Amino acid sequence: MTAVLGARFAAELLESLLEQRDAQSVRALQPIGRLLGLAGLWGLGWGGLGALLWMEVMVCLLTLVVGQFLLVRRLHCISSEGNESLDWREVRHFVAHLSASQLLTATGDAGAARLVVARLLGPEAAGVFGFLQQLLMTANRYLPSLLLGNVVRPMLVSREAEGNIPLVGVGVAMLVKLNTLAALLALAVVVSGGDDLLSLAMGRGVEDAGAMLALLMLGLLAQAVSQVAMLALQVYRLPSVVSRASLVSPVTTVLCALGAATAGLAGATAGIAVGMWLRGLVWLHALRKGPVTPIDWRGLSRCAAAAAAVVLACLVARPWVGGVTGATLCAACLLGLAYWRFPLTAGELGLLSRGLGARARSLLRIKLP
């Protein structure tokens, strides 16, 4: 725990210094080292929990050493250019509310839900549930708010500090759109693939696994909005709104427990999906506490309609082509539609052009009507 927290702290500081390459190298070192360690243990025939834990400790210590080395090297390159007073009252205000938000969020996260399922349904159901959750977490990891968050956040903060609030609102609205479209793509692929896609991923068939994962991906649509709303409220310096909105987080675990007790594994996933949507609606309402965010609901509705049409066509063709081929065709069609006619407003097009510069020319020629 100490090594992991130390390495994560080093990565966070490197990100705040805009050293993205070093920060992401530190973050990537642990999963890569763990994978190599597992391969080494398997090759040497060293089984058991003890060997696994020692391997984990060595990988974490290596990540800590590399992270601290990169951080110290960067700090030595910084030269002081005068002193500015720091508003410690604002710092304490942020720390108090965001710490409370983190604590409340932990009561409704994936780990808490797994504990509930393991307690109520047993270890075998918990294994299947954990695998479905891992697929959800993988899809969530590729949402633009997380994938590009370390790049977008400093840009939004700098514009807010300059007083350019309308531009911040456009950036938040575009991030909501990108997040929602990515989650919509994941949902469409899962629905098109069904149980065949899950059987390929799990190596064995599980009854209604496709429907359960589809429920989780449906919840991801709401989570896509929640993540951007939390980011925006921090940029707008409203940490008290963040902590109040986080009060709804434990509801997800409660609904998961009620669903598991009522309808087993399917009920647990349905409870989580409902909880994620309740949290999404609360965060969307909380976002209204800040400046106006021009979210393009009309464009998102058109995208949802197009995705529904593609999914329906793939479901009709699935008996002949199979679930895996259907999911592949669905992804290819949706990505092709997005490249041909991405629904961007004039403000979002301008922001994208400013952010990408000359590289946006070929892209914008396709997007503009």
Image (cartoon, grey):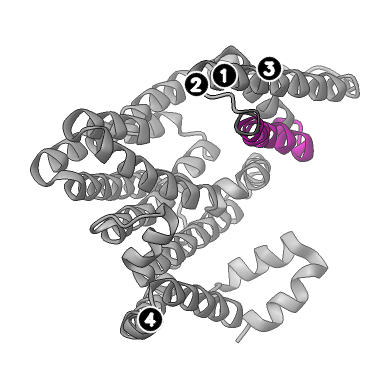
Residue 260 at least partly seen: yes
Residue 172 lies in the magenta-colored region: no
- Residue for badge 1: 51
Q: Nearer the viewer, mark 4 or mark 2?
A: 2
Does 37 lie within the magenta span? yes
According to the picture, the residue beneath numbered tag 2 turns out to be 48
> Real-space Cα distance between discs 2 and 1?
6 Å
- Label 4 crowding class (10 Å Cα cut-off): few <14, some 14-19, many 20+? many
What SS does tag 2 mark? loop
- Please say whether residue 309 is visible from this viewpoint: no
Q: Residue under label 3, please give it.
A: 61
> Residue at position x 63%, y 80% from top?
367
Near-viewer residue (143 or 320): 320
Q: Nearer the viewer, mark 3 or mark 2?
A: 2
Report whether 153 appears left or right of 247: right
The residue depicted at 25 percent of the width and 31 percent of the height is 118
Closer to the N terminus: mark 3 or mark 2?
Answer: 2
Q: Is residue 43 left or right of residue 316?
A: right
Pointer 4: what residue? Answer: 314
Q: CA distance from mark 4 to mark 2?
A: 45 Å
Q: Residue at x 68, y 17 (%)?
A: 61
Q: Nearer the viewer, residue 365 or 106?
A: 106
N-term mark: 4 or 2? 2
Q: Which residues are magenta?
A: 15-40
What is the number of the mark on residue 318? none
User: Where on the picture, by quarter, is residue 83?
Assistant: top right
Q: Mark 1 and mark 4 in contact? Answer it, CB < 8 Å.
A: no
Quarter location, residue 295: bottom left
Residue in front for this viewpoint, 260 or 88: 260
Please name the amino acid that badge 2 sits on. Gly
Q: Amino acid at mark 4?
A: Cys
329, above or below 222, in the image: below
